[in-house]
Image: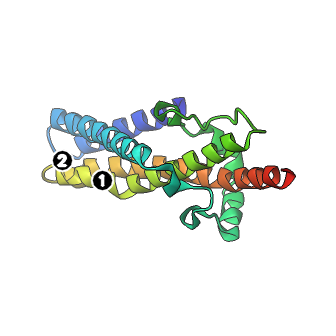
């Protein structure tokens, strides 16, 4: 969480300073625009998470081909060394009722299935946040749409890609655990 808040705070500061130096708007307008855009990002991401959390679990089932991770994708995650940094990703699933930070019941197939469903919900939530994060550009007038709202959206994009990669990295491992448990039965 500290990492994310540091990235967000630093990005807000840098975006503000650059806009003030280049005089894209008055300093107080720039600061207000940066704060508003950042708050909108949080609100939009939260709204998406709430909507996805209300959807039926069967849409995110273990066998849903939309969430299948290919071998090529697994190799990409290996190259990106996701295993080394995935635990530093901010995990807010606990707010929706299921934290994916640690595997609490590794021997319970129902729990593993629930974990996979929650991972799939998280993937969709973050993927929808990619384009929706650019919506505030429509509400910030003049040049600040490109000098404030777009950089804030770009930071939001990066901060949404990271959990997507971590979730997609973990899902095949969980599916393998579930398959082993089902074979034992």
The 10 Å Cα crowd at callout 2, few under 14, some 14 to 19, many 20 or more, is some
Is there any visible trace of residue 181 in the rendered image?
A: yes
Compared to residue 173, the image places residue 74 above or below, namely below
Q: Which mark is residue 150?
A: 1
Q: Is residue 111 left or right of residue 93?
A: right
Residue 154 rendering spot, x and y as whole percentages: 38, 52
Q: Nearer the viewer, mark 2 or mark 1?
A: 1
Label 1's element? helix
Depth order, front residue of 55/71: 55
Q: Which mark is residue 27?
A: none
Q: Residue at x 58, y 67 (%)?
A: 65
Q: Which mark is residue 24?
A: 2
Residue 10 rendering spot, x and y as whole percentages: 42, 36
Q: Are marks 2 and 1 in contact (CB under 8 Å)?
A: no
Q: Is residue 169 left or right of residue 43?
A: right
Q: Is residue 84 left or right of residue 156?
A: right
Marker count (numbered)? 2
Residue reaching furthest to the front: 185
Q: Residue at x 32, y 54 (%)?
A: 132
The 10 Å Cα crowd at callout 1, few under 14, some 14 to 19, many 20 or more, is some
Residue 151 rendering spot, x and y as whole percentages: 34, 50
Is there any visible trace of residue 162 in the rendered image?
A: no
Quarter where residue 85 is shown: top right
Label 2's element? loop
Residue reaching furthest to the right: 184
Closer to the N terminus: mark 2 or mark 1? Answer: 2
Residue 11 rendering spot, x and y as whole percentages: 39, 40
Q: State the separation of the CA atoms marked 2 and 1.
A: 14 Å
Compared to residue 159, the image places residue 105 above or below, namely above
Q: Residue at x 65, y 47 (%)?
A: 113
Depth order, front residue of 181/86: 181
């Amino acid at each position: 969480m500290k990492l994310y808040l540091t990235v967000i705070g630093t990005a807000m500061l840098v975006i503000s300073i650059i806009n003030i130096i280049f005089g894209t708007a008055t300093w107080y307008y720039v600061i207000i625009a940066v704060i508003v855009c950042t708050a909108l990002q949080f609100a939009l991401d939260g709204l998406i998470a709430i909507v996805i959390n209300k959807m039926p679990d069967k849409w995110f089932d273990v066998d849903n081909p939309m969430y299948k991770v290919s071998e090529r994708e697994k190799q990409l995650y290996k190259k990106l060394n996701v295993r080394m940094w995935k635990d530093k990703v901010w995990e807010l699933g606990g707010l929706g009722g299921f934290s994916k930070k640690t595997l609490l019941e590794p021997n319970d197939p129902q729990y593993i299935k629930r974990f996979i469903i929650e991972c799939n919900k998280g993937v969709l939530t973050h993927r929808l946040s990619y384009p929706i994060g650019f919506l505030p550009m429509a509400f910030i007038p003049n040049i600040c749409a490109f000098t404030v709202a777009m950089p804030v959206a770009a930071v939001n994009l990066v901060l949404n890609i990271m959990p997507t990669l971590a979730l997609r990295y973990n899902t095949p491992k969980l599916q393998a655990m579930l398959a082993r448990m089902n074979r034992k039965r």
